[in-house]
Image (tube, rainbow, N blue to C red):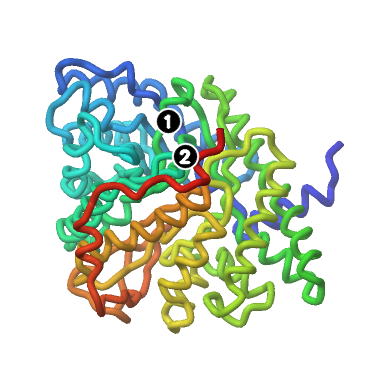
Amino acid sequence: MLNLNDIMETINMIQSENLDIRTITMGISLLDCIDSDAEKACEKIYNKITRLAGNLVKVGEDIEREYGIPIINKRISVTPISMLLGASGGNPVLYAKALQRAADATGVNFIGGYSALVHKGFSAGDVELIKSIPEALSVTTNVCSSVNIGSTKAGINMDAVKLMGEVVREAAEVTQDRDCIGCAKLVVFCNAVEDNPFMAGAFHGVGEPDCVIHVGVSGPGVVQAAIKKCPDVTLDEIAEIIKKTAFKITRMGQLVGTEASTRLGVPFGIVDLSLAPTPAVGDSVAHILEEMGLGRCGIHGTTAALAMLNDAVKKGGVMASSSVGGLSGAFIPVSEDAGMITAARSGDLVIEKLEAMTAVCSVGLDMIVIPGDTPAETISAIIADEAAIGMVNSKTTAVRVIPAIGKKSGEELEFGGLLGSGPVMNVNTNFSPKKFIDRAGRIPAPMQSLKN
């Protein structure tokens, strides 16, 4: 039976506390688009995406209007393009342009899957696709790219780590005239998941159905507001508050996902529980941590508070849905979180502390602006460090850093919209990791991999 108080509480969450559905993402398998002719394969890709996702935006808008629930983004994820490239051949950028045409035709915000999975080595098409990423991201506007370079089972492919440091830097250079936006659409993963609805890292895994709907919820402002109402409670009581709030947020995501699935005639996949912040005031993960009692996000105690937040969000979410998946935790993207931006500007939040925080949350070093003269081998070393945290802890970690070409530590880079803006954070380049990165090879899988 509907409870009037629950209804009014949800309305208040939407109107005053920035509660929204961050994205509904349609995952589409492109394996049946393989063709011996690359141009024909690209045409099949365009046709399949537009056929299945042609009504995605309209359905999202209809649900938004009928239920009064904001749905910020409508997105598409596809089979990692390196798989099609290995079978069909051709210029990799042709596939990126086909994805862009499909994004334009369907009206989605982003389309993810210009991706490669190379955690245990390179197969046909992988190297060609990875080397083409800077060009592909520079000639498209809505295409997102990701590369998985490690896993708990396989270890870390250091050849790929070295290559990705170079690719990230090149992607910044070729989009320098657009505030290095290419790097904001590129993620390097360890333990990438197959059902992630969030960009820029979403791709459609080979174990997924032919077509599926995933939902990513948000709600940092709701969690912060709930804690603020109870200023003098203990930490275990705060954990209970977060769990109950996450339950309510997830139920809304479940409702939207089920409704979208029914209207589009495709299976419902998962609800991703991740608290996804925005640059808007009152929609910040950092401010949740500060509401718990930290004077500023980034000081000592931040990792412990974030660990508790992440755990409580998951516990509340899994009680609300039997279809929880994706990344499910708390994102800490610096440029997309008003509180993180403030803490980074003041110097209280540094990259080393962010790295420690990634051991207990989703996903990793995300949307961090670094000096434009940061060498490729240092970027590779940042990727290797983050991958090691994911590999050893059996969790997904990622790196999305933006070398701000022509800018130094303390300056600002402005993206606008959900990508926000960020201060250029200092990177330790006193000594070089070049010899370590140049060794290449593979860091073997840890003991945790031997679970069978």
Q: Nearer the viewer, residue 221 or 104?
A: 221
Image coords of residue 211 (percent x, y): 46, 23
> Which residue matches tag 1?
205
Does the CB distance between marks 1 and 2 fall below 8 Å? yes
- The residue at 52%/52% (across/down) is 393
- Find residue 121 and report its horizontal and vertical position in percent: 28, 38
For the point 20% across and 59% down, the residue is 169
The residue wearing badge 2 is 193
Image quadrant holding the C terminus, namely: top right
What residue is drawn where x is 40% and y is 54%?
387
Q: Residues within 10 Å of mark 2 (few under 14, many from 20)?
A: some
Amino acid type, label 2: Val
Q: Circle 2 — which element? A: loop
Query: Where in the figure is residue 26, as x and y percent of width and height?
Result: 46, 32
Residue 180 in percent (x, y) is at 24, 61
The quarter of the picture where the N terminus appears is top right
Amino acid type of the residue tagged 1 in the rendering: Gly
Residue 344 relative to residue 299: left or right = left
Determine if residue 149 is in view: yes
Q: Is residue 195 left or right of residue 43?
A: right
Q: Residue at x 41, y 61 (%)?
A: 365
